[in-house]
Image (spheres, grey):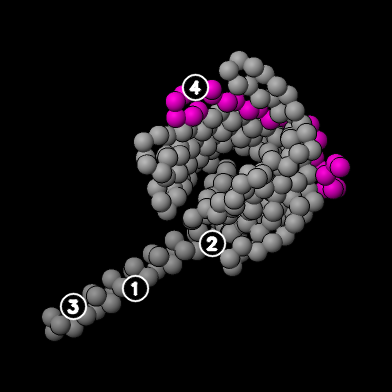
Amino acid sequence: MPDVLESESMRAGRRFRFERWSVVALILLGVAALARAQEKAHGSYFPLDLRRHWRYQLTLEVDGTQKKAFRDRTNVSATKLGERDAVVVEEKLENNLTLTETYAQDGDAILLLASRAEGGAEHVLDPPRPMILLSRLDTVGAVWTWTSTDGRESWVTTVTTKGIDKEGREEVILVAKGTQRSRDSLKTATQEKTITLVRGVGMTREEDLIVPPDEQHKTKMTSELRSHDRTDAPK
């Protein structure tokens, strides 16, 4: 009899664990499905449809000197990186190519897969970095983190504000703080971005502060959206 009771108890425990994890899985699936449904109905906070183009007024400040330029971002082409379908995004300053990035959407995550500064080699992120977790944007205080496999680079992103912009659109503000160590781990640079995202539009403002290891020649870049469209980028 004790063996029978023990067996029934064990089976009951297994059923409880299975049912508990089933409920958790259903909740997670429901949250991801809700994020996808909202994105479809109202537009994405980070659109990846091809030929989407944004033009920003960039203000660059270094050592008290200020310069202005036009910054353009364009979703230029579809590609495949590993097993992921992805989109190539080009950045230009005053019509000169400066940066190429590759993004993909995986469930509710917008992932940065690779980046390449003009004239340099492509850097494939390992693992891919979650730039945005769509299902968490409704929760002020939500946090997600990323660390490279080699441990040299890490980011912590926090949802700081959720509201409505002056045109009545849903708006979210993120603060992303990153560190990058040199190969010998003796030097560390830091970066802090404050990013404003508007549903159906994308990024409307970005403040980017880069502090080199010697903490001299700090660079601050502020980008303000001037226009966005679905046509080809200006020639």
Image disc number at residue 216? 4
- Residue at image position (58%, 59%) is 107
**Residue type indicated by callout 2:** Leu
- Image depth: mark 3 or mark 4 in front: 4
- Image depth: mark 4 or mark 2 in front: 4
- Residue at image position (69%, 30%) is 223
**Mark with earlier residue (4, 2):** 2
**Residue type indicated by callout 4:** Gln
- Residue under label 3, please give it: 6
Quadrant for the C terminus in the image: top right
User: In the figure, residue 228 lies in which quadrant?
Assistant: top right
**Mark with earlier residue (4, 1):** 1
Q: Determine the CA span between mark 1 and mark 3.
A: 14 Å
- Image depth: mark 2 or mark 3 in front: 2
Nearer to me, 130 or 14: 130
**Residue type indicated by callout 3:** Glu
Report the side of 149 relative to 171 (left or right). Answer: left
Image disc number at residue 29? 2
**Residue type indicated by callout 1:** Arg
**Extreme-top residue of the structure:** 64
**Mark with earlier residue (2, 1):** 1
- Residue at image position (61%, 46%) is 120
Q: Residues within 10 Å of mark 3 (few under 14, many from 20)?
A: few
Q: Determine the CA span between mark 2 and mark 1.
A: 21 Å
User: Magenta span covers which residues?
Assistant: 211-235
Q: Residues within 10 Å of mark 1 (few under 14, many from 20)?
A: few
